[in-house]
Image (cartoon, grey):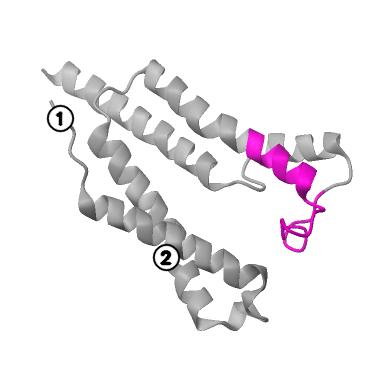
Amino acid sequence: MEKRREVLVDALRGVAVLAVLLGHAIQRGLVINYETNIVFKIIYSFHMPLFMLVSGYSLYKYTKKYDITFLKRRFFRLIIPTIVWSYLIYFVRQFNFVGIKEFILFPDSLIEYTKILFWHPDFVIWFLYIVFLSTIIIFMQRKLINEKYHKIS
């Protein structure tokens, strides 16, 4: 059976990506006092909720089998990149082209940074972590529904 792409879902993803790019460009230096910029305010009112909505819809619609293998795959596709990017950002934080050191206070020690990431895995790269937590919630919800349904039958 051939999988068909949903044009609306792809278009919403595109809008969200463009909004993130424009929002970060405004925040990182295109506009002085970006917090008062109306375009910035509009973008930051919807772009991440839109990503989460589209991700959740796609997860629900296109995932047929929720098992432990699925959860492991999601872990490696979401949490491992979160960890890698979090450390990469730590190592390049001082470079001007990154533009992040004004927004996040990083500890001087890599050990301290690792402790922060252990207790707050969403410290820098929060969105992949949240998508993974949402996956666990949906996984548990489907397991509970299936168990309840099978007990009734």
Main SS of the magenta part reads: loop
Q: Residue at x 55, y 32 (%)?
A: 79
Please state which amino acid type lies under the numbered disc 1: Glu
| Rendered position, 147 above or below 124 | above
| Rendered position, 72 above or below 59 | above
| Rendered position, 42 above or below 97 | below
Q: For the N terminus, give its image quadrant.
A: top left
The numbered dot on residue 51 is none
Tell me the crowding category of disc 2: few under 14, some 14 to 19, or many 20 or more residues within 10 angstroms, Cα based: few
| Rendered position, 27 above or below 87 | below
26 to the left or right of 13: right
Label 2: state its secondary structure. helix
Q: Position of residue 13 (x, y in %)?
A: 36, 53
Residue 12 position by quadrant: bottom left
Residue 150 position by quadrant: top left
Mark 2 or mark 1: name the one nearer the start of the chain.
1
As for residue 89 lying within the magenta part, the answer is: yes
Label 1: state its secondary structure. loop
Tell me the crowding category of disc 1: few under 14, some 14 to 19, or many 20 or more residues within 10 angstroms, Cα based: few
Q: Residue at x 33, y 50 (%)?
A: 54
Q: Nearer the viewer, residue 37 or 17?
A: 17
The residue beneath circle 1 is: 2
- Looking at the rendered image, the disc whose residue lies closer to the viewer, 2 or 1, is 1
The residue beneath circle 2 is: 46
As for residue 1 lying within the magenta part, the answer is: no
Task: State which region is magenta.
Answer: 84-106
